[in-house]
Image (tube, rainbow, N blue to C red):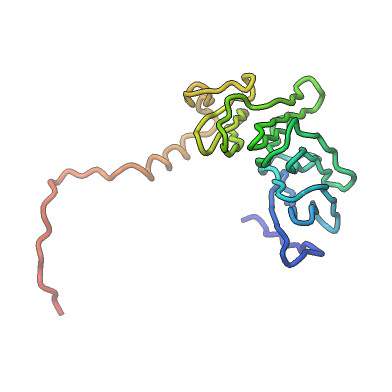
């Protein structure tokens, strides 16, 4: 059984808007009210214009944690230091950013603005999601190495790796089963949904007197 680590986050306001995530094995706390990031220990980093900001989904270990504000994607060094700010093509309501395979992803509901920032500039992208229905709430979905944008209200899905192509059939883009996942988990899932086998015919219940 793994050890449980407890630590106190200093200088919190009574009405702090706390959000928590994990970057590798490091827990990160973010106060969206003050814009303060607590990456560990006594270190704090301030994020400008943080009202309504969203902290990234848990990810593999990396040097930064991602915060999406209403107008930008902000990469905050976990070791302290000045954050790096990437302005969005247009403002909106930010979804939780994603860090996967060397790239940061951010998207904003309302405007449909989208950003991808990777190690190296070759795959960096700043664009707008096309075909977005008015009022749709956008969220990232991740399946292994596949990142898509999903409209929670209207069900549309866009595949980032395919030039933000709008898809209708999820089976066309879902990766095949991973043989390394093993059979044990599949068997457990099957057992949880498989009804027990029965050979006897169902019969109505027979009432009997209680014995004392």
**Furthest residue in direction bottom, as rendered:** 212
> Is residue 80 rendered to the left or right of residue 58?
right
- Snapshot quadrant of residue 74: top right
**Furthest residue in direction right, as rendered:** 81
Question: Which residue is depicted at the point 50% across and 28% down?
Answer: 177
Question: Which residue is depicted at the point 48% across and 24% down?
Answer: 168
- Residue 22 in the image: state x and y as whole percent: 70, 47
- Residue 61 in the image: state x and y as whole percent: 74, 40
The number of callouts visible is: 0
- Snapshot quadrant of residue 9: bottom right
> Is residue 192 rendered to the left or right of residue 20?
left
Visible in this render: residue 102? no
- Asked if 70 appears above or below 164 in the picture, the reply is below
Q: Camera-side residue: 154 or 175? A: 154
The N terminus - image quarter: bottom right
- Residue 126 in the image: state x and y as whole percent: 74, 26
- Asked if 116 appears above or below 59 in the picture, the reply is above
Q: Camera-side residue: 109 or 39? A: 109
- Asked if 208 appears above or below 183 in the picture, the reply is below
Visible in this render: residue 118? yes
Question: Which residue is depicted at the point 72% across and 37% down?
Answer: 91
The C terminus - image quarter: bottom left
- Residue 43 in the image: state x and y as whole percent: 86, 55
């Amino acid at each position: 059984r793994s050890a449980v680590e407890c630590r106190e986050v200093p200088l919190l306001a009574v009405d702090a808007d706390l959000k928590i995530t994990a970057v590798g094995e490091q827990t990160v706390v973010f106060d969206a009210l003050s814009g303060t990031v607590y990456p560990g220990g006594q270190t704090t980093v301030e994020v400008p214009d943080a009202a309504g900001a969203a902290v990234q989904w848990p990810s593999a270990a990396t040097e930064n944690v991602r915060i999406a504000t209403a107008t930008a994607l902000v990469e905050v060094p976990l070791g302290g230091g000045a954050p790096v700010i990437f302005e969005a093509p247009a403002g909106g309501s930010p979804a939780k950013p994603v860090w996967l395979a060397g790239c940061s992803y951010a998207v904003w509901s309302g405007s449909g603005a989208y950003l991808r920032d990777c190690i190296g500039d070759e795959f960096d992208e700043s664009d707008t999601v096309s075909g977005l229905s008015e009022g749709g709430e956008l969220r990232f979905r991740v399946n292994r190495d596949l990142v898509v944008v999903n409209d929670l209200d209207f069900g549309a899905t866009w595949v980032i790796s395919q030039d933000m192509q709008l898809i209708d059939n999820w089976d066309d883009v879902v990766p095949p089963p991973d043989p390394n996942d093993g059979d044990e988990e599949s068997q457990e899932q099957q057992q949880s949904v498989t009804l027990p086998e029965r050979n006897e015919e169902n019969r109505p219940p027979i009432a009997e007197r209680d014995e004392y």
